[in-house]
Structure formats: C-alpha cells, structure tokens
Amino acid sequence: MQRYQILSQNEIGQIHETSLRIMEEVGVIFSYAPAREILAKGGAKVDGQRVYFPKAMVEREIKKAPSSFTLYARNPEKNVLINTQKTAYVGPYGSPFVMDMDNGRRLAKLEDFINICKLEHKMDNIDIMSHIPCEPQDVDVEVRSLEMVYQTLKHSDKPLMATVLGYEMTKRNLEMAAIVFGGLEVIKEKPVAVGIPCTLTPLSYDDKMAGAIIAYAEYRQPQLVNSLCIAGATTPVTVAGTVALQNAEVLAGIVLAQLVSEGTPIIYSASSSNAEMSNGSLAIGTPEDAVFSLINGQLAKFYNLPCRISGALSDSKCADAQAAYESMLTLSMAQMAGGNFILHSAGIIDTYNTISLEKMMFDDEIIGMIRRIDQGVVVNEETLAFDVTKEVGPQGQFLTHVHTFNHFRKEFYRPILSDRNNPTQWEAEGSLTAEKRANARWKKLLEEYAEPVLDKDVDAALRKYKDK
Amino acid sequence: MQRYQILSQNEIGQIHETSLRIMEEVGVIFSYAPAREILAKGGAKVDGQRVYFPKAMVEREIKKAPSSFTLYARNPEKNVLINTQKTAYVGPYGSPFVMDMDNGRRLAKLEDFINICKLEHKMDNIDIMSHIPCEPQDVDVEVRSLEMVYQTLKHSDKPLMATVLGYEMTKRNLEMAAIVFGGLEVIKEKPVAVGIPCTLTPLSYDDKMAGAIIAYAEYRQPQLVNSLCIAGATTPVTVAGTVALQNAEVLAGIVLAQLVSEGTPIIYSASSSNAEMSNGSLAIGTPEDAVFSLINGQLAKFYNLPCRISGALSDSKCADAQAAYESMLTLSMAQMAGGNFILHSAGIIDTYNTISLEKMMFDDEIIGMIRRIDQGVVVNEETLAFDVTKEVGPQGQFLTHVHTFNHFRKEFYRPILSDRNNPTQWEAEGSLTAEKRANARWKKLLEEYAEPVLDKDVDAALRKYKDK
C-alpha cells in the first residue's frame, strides 16, 4: 500500500526549512517563565518573552521523541498501540453545546457529558475517550476537569485524555487518573492519559498550555502538541505559508517537552483550516481542512512521529446532509493522510461548537466504512479464486458457492446505520431518513449501556481525590 | 503528488495474470456472431458461443488503444481532454425513477429528463452530459435513445454520451449526433459521443452490447467497455477474485474494439461492487465499492488507459445524510483512484434506480470540494510567505494583509450549498437544512437556465433524422 502524497518530499523539505527559519529568526512567544528557562538552558536565545530556536537545537530535540508507544486502558484488552502505521479513533473534544433531534441545541450539562461518555464507550469504532466531548456548564469550572476525568474513568474502561489547564491542574488530573492504575510511578512507565496543549497562534504559547506541556512531560504522559491556525486570519492565507508557521509552533512545543523529559511520548498534532472570508471566522468542514490534514500526515511521517489529524468535522448547524458529506470528507482524508490519532471522530457540528448525538451515529458508520478501506485487500490464490471462477463459468452464479460463504464476513463491512433495502421495504419500515434512524440508534445504545466494573475502593479513592 | 495505491504493483500483476488465465482457459461467451467472427480472425479460439483468448493476442491488442484523446463539444470551449491524468465529471446514467422533495419518487418522464439535462448543463462541475440520466418512460422505447440524443444536444453544448442498444441503433445515434458536427467523417477524426457497452457478468456479452462495441469502433467514437460485477453473486465474493474476473471481461471487450478498428479510443471502465448478503442484491454506497474503484484506477494505469470510475453513489432512498456520506466516499475515492471519467457524478440514490434533484445539488458541492483537493498546493517563496510571517510576527493578524487579499480566491474553494454562518444567522435565515437549500438551488438553476443557441437548420435536420 502506498499512501497518497499531496506534496513531494522536496516540498515537505521546503516547509521544514521555512519553519526552522521562522523559529530561528522570528521566534515564538512564551509568556510562562519556567518554559523560557528550560528552553534557554537547552540552547534557545531568549529576548523578553520571545524565544529564538537555533536550527541544530530543534533538529536535535525532535529526534528524541519516540515513534511508537502503548496507551494503557483500565481494561487491558482496550490498550491502544500508537505508532506511525495504525489508526486510533478518538471522541470529540471541547464543545460547549449539545444537540439532538428531540431537545434541540442547548448548553451542555453533566448529564449530557455522561451520556456522550456512554455512547463513546458503546461505539466499537471509538478507541480512546476524549477528555471533554462537551463542557458540562453546570459543573464549577474550578473542579470541572477533575469531574470529567472521574466520570470518564467511571463510565468507560477505554484509555482517556485529560486536561491542559496549566501546570498544577494538569498534574492533579494525571495524579487522579494514576489512582486507577497503581500510582504515578506505574503510569510514568505505562502512560494512560493523553493531553492536547495548544499554541496561541500565531507563534505563541500562553501560561496554561506551556505549563501543561511541562506537566505531561514530567509525568511521561503522551501529548499532542497542537496548532490550529486559521489560514488568512491567524496565519498567511496560503496553505504552504500556514503549514510552515503551524509547523514552527508545533516543533517549539515538542522541543520544550523533550527538554523537560527526553523521550517523552509525543503525537505530532495540527488542526489548521481556512477562514471563511465572508466573515473571517474558522471553517472546518472544508476541502482546505482536508488538504491541511494530508500535508500534516506527510510532515509527521517526515519527523517519524505518530500523527494526530482531525476527522468528522462539519460547519453545519444540524445533523443533515452537509454534516454527513463534510464529515466523510474530513474522516476519509484523515485516513488517506495516514493519521494515527484521529481526534473529534464523532459528533462535531457547528465548527466545533456543538455535539450532535445523531451525528455521532453517522460518524460511527463512517469510521466503520473507512476502516474497511484501511483493512486493504488480500491477494493470493484463495482470494483470486481462479478455480472457483472456472468451476462456475460464464453466466453462472456465485451466491451459493461455498467460497462465498467462507469469505463474505471478512471481505464485506456490515453497516450499522445505512439502509440497503429496496424502496418498498424502506417505505414499509416508515420511510426513515438516516437522521431518524440515528436518533433511534443513540437511544438504543444508551439503553444497552452497562457500566464497566470499577473497584469500590478505587472509586472511593477517586471521589476523595477529586472532592478534596 | 503520489497517488494512493491500495495494492502493490506485484499484486496488480497477479490480478492481470489471473485475468489472462480466465480469458484463455475459461473463455467469454459472445452470443453475437459478428463479434465471434472478428475475434476468431484476430486469433481467438471459438467453440460454440464461447471465445478463448490467447494471452499474446490480448497483450498485443490492448496496447493499441490510445492513452489520450479529445472529446469534442458543440461549444469548443467545452471540449474535454480525456487522458490518464485529468478528471472529467459526467452526469448520472440510467435511472428509471426521479425524485424531489416536492413531488416524491415517480417514474421519469421526458419533462424530468429535460430538467435534468438543464441542471447538468448549468452545473459547472459537470463536464460531460450523460446519455440517459433518467429513462423517460413516456417516450416510445423504439425511438427513446434518439430522442435523448436530440434533447441532450438541444439543451446543452457540452459533450455527450449515446446509446448502446445494439449495432444498428448505436449507429443511428452516432449518425444523428454527427449532423451537428459536420457529418460522420468529421466525427471519426474528432469524437463527440461516448458509449458504455456493458458485459453480462459473469464472462459474457449479449448481442446488443457486442454490437455496440463494433459500432462505436467503426465510427471511432470513444467507448467505456464496462463490467459491473456483484461480488458474491455474479463473481467470487473476494475483492481479488471479482477484480480478476471483471478485468477479463473488460479486456475481452477492448480486444474486440481494437480488432474492429485499431487505435479506437477506449476508457477502461469497471463499476463492480458488493452484494448486500442479507438479500443478495447490489449495494453501491459501500466501502467495498470504493475499494474496487481504488483497484480499478491502478489497473487502468497498469494498461496506460484513461479510467472510468463511478462516483456519487448511494443506496439511500432519499436525499439524506446517508446519501451524502456515501456520495462523498465514492466520489472522493474516485478522485484518490485517479479516475479520469467519473460517471454518475450527480444525483444517484436508491442503488442507481432513482435520481434525486436535491442530491444533484449535494454532489455539485462535493465535486467542487474534491476538485479543490485535486488542484493541489503550490509551494514556493511567495506561498511559503516567510517575509509576511516575519512582518506580522507573533500574536499578529493576517486578515488585512495584502498577501491575504492577493491569494485567497485561488487558495480557497467557495461553497455553493454548504452553510458557514453561525447558529444565530442560520436560525435567522430559517434554520434550513442542506436538503432544503438544495431544493431551492435546483429550482433557481432551472429558472436561470438559458438554452444554448442551436442553428435552426441543424435543429431541423436533427428532428428530421430522429422522426424518420
């Protein structure tokens, strides 16, 4: 299998070189003093808040990040190997609003958060729980991230993500998660929680994110050092110019993490997209977003790092056809890009602002379809089936042949939402659109949900930690 | 740019070899005696209706098909270069039913046919008119194909397709089309109409299709020799086995065409998909369909021939989210496969049986998005924009920079259906789903439609020919 490459290796090299020039000659602002101290000690030139990165220092540090690691789950069967080849699908992240066909769009509450956790847990195509699929606005913001880590651990035994709200709170998140796994020293060897510290584009990091990078690195938990540029607003309008700047930001964060703790796991992460020029705001369900994903995949492979790409993105305001085609575009191009950690894999509409429960169900199907493509095709004597063809011959039929029976389950993806009935059957079943079937499906998944067992003492310890 | 390759070249070679074995050892049924005579004269072994193709004969003949040709339109600005690099998008083909949100699903009439012609003509993303977007059931079947060629020529100045209903009727179609272009001798040099003769899977050709192959070749019009296998029903259930058989059928047709007229233009064409195993019927909006497309793209490139792939396919019974995500999957994978002639590019739902006018509008947008990806990314000093980044610096903004103004139109795709407003604006505009906006859009396109001028004498000659 040969991946799609929208740019040549020479063009990727030009982007890399431009990023290094930006880091060395333009610099990156770090408002957080401890970060500047670490970078200065590592060889950076610091002038006020601005940090200039010598080329040799960057190239030395980025080589220290591993290209493969395992993310541990409280159910060992759900451990996830993260490397430059495999693809893990991760829940949505960070929406203030939730929406469904019954109750419309509203600010998310803890009840919504828990329901989305349950759905993510039930969806076979979701490998990793996001930290914050929606922001539960009825939970005090001071303790919200701890509450979310607790509820995620309680409602799922898949691996999880944690907060990036500064050095102290990030450490508290990770310490709490460690309780389930036998303590901090255990998780330093066997990482359990992923964070996504983000740049403040263009070319800066705020206190909280720089603090989070240091915290994740100190506790050896994997981090996606992420840049979300808005081409034409926060970065140059050209794709190449945006990627060069974005890459400079991401590399700056990776260098910081490696200086804190050499070899700490990193996922190369970028989620840039274009501005909608009529209003200057971000748009994400766009072909430009897909183009950025394709380039980001190549860049991550250039650095031999696992790659985070966003999928299932949409600017639609409801779970409609636009949501569906934008989601399929961004998810399929995330796969084409060779993404290894696909964040926002289910539910996003309204340019990251809303999670639609119906769209979570569309995306579950879409991931399944894409995984079938990723599974590839086996070519050998048995699958080429010359003897079967010879036996059946011209104008024969293969439906009842034993070869068909032996292979169809492996060869064919079985849909979970899509309808393949004829129109008469479809009408007899109520002429249900995909949206209506999706509405029925998330309710069914919630009904079927069973909470994975969490040891009572561990549960008590978690509660004690978060409420202290 | 490096295309995605789901199979290695070695695996493509194995498929090719298996196809040649099938052609040589299993054979292909041709019920049409003139076809058997031509094939026998070319070196095939004929036993009853079954034709066995020596390997050397196949490899000799398929090399004779050109890898590039121009398809001429009555408006020279709309000529289409067909080669192994570029992509042309072609209308839908062959649905008995038509559907829209106002009038529901019904058997197609001539009025529907004309409306779809007008929409195809208006859609910038459609490069070639299909012959039969829907079957106008109120036109006598004996004269239907001529009526469709006439109406297509009258309502659009883009290139077109024509019938495959046997040797005689195919010739009449092409002779009528030739009237517009100065006669048969002209179009033999400058082809104007594409046909799609199809195999009767597995491993046979009926009289009409074999006759059509000969007619297209005699008049030197391009043809898509096509195989639509249903994996698990008409061919082996394994992808590799289906492709090997499908390829044997397609090569048999190409050999016939080249024996009739060496160098006659051919588009390698295949549209196999999987059976829905619960009922044994064809399913097309599937990941397996996309996998077949990816392999077919590689096979066509192996033979150095332009490649027809299907896109915009769906099994949904209405213009809903399923229709949208299936369509995006099949169209984007057609592009990833390097398809050069994407048939069914707009409107198909219900497994080829229905054209939805709203879905035509979804697909217009989807093609536009995919074309943006295909356009690629320019990487040079101007687009890398180091100087712009240096000038703006950390925490600056790029929205008002002249570089942004100079480049945004080229870098960004401008949507024609997708909504990128915020929720407040979207609600103020009526909370319209993509389906409702699509409904308004096809009506607007029909209102705006203006018939391209057709010389009165030519029109009269066409009418005389079709009614004789």
Image: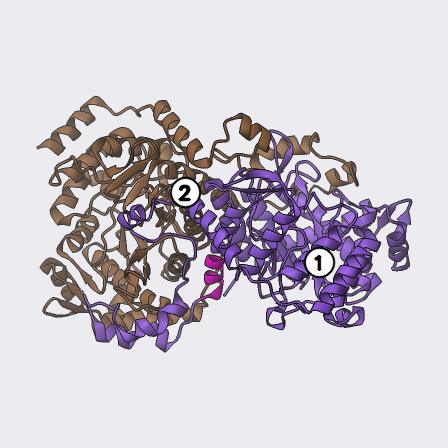
Chain colours: A brown, B purple
Image quadrant in which you'd find residue A298: bottom left
Rendered residue at 22%/67% (across/down): B397
The answer to if B371 sits in the magenta stretch is yes
Q: Residues within 10 Å of mark 2 (few under 14, many from 20)?
A: many
Chain of the residue under label 1: B
Against A104, is A443 above or below?
A: above
Rendered residue at 60%/41% (across/down): B351
Q: Amino acid at mark 1?
A: Tyr
Against A321, is B457 above or below?
A: below
The tag on residue B150 is: 1
Query: Which-is-in-front pick, marks 2 and 1?
Result: 1
Distance, label 2 to label 1, CA atoms, is 38 Å
Stretch of the chain drawn in magenta = B368-376
Left or right: where A267 falls relative to A325: left
The tag on residue A294 is: none
The answer to if A101 sits in the magenta stretch is no
Image quadrant in which you'd find residue A226: bottom left
Q: Amino acid at mark 2?
A: Asp
Q: Position of residue A411 (x, y in %)?
A: 58, 38
Question: Does dot 1 land on a helix, a strand or a loop?
Answer: helix
Q: Is residue B296 visible?
A: yes
Chain of the residue under label 2: A
Question: Does dot 2 land on a helix, a strand or a loop?
Answer: loop
The tag on residue A320 is: 2
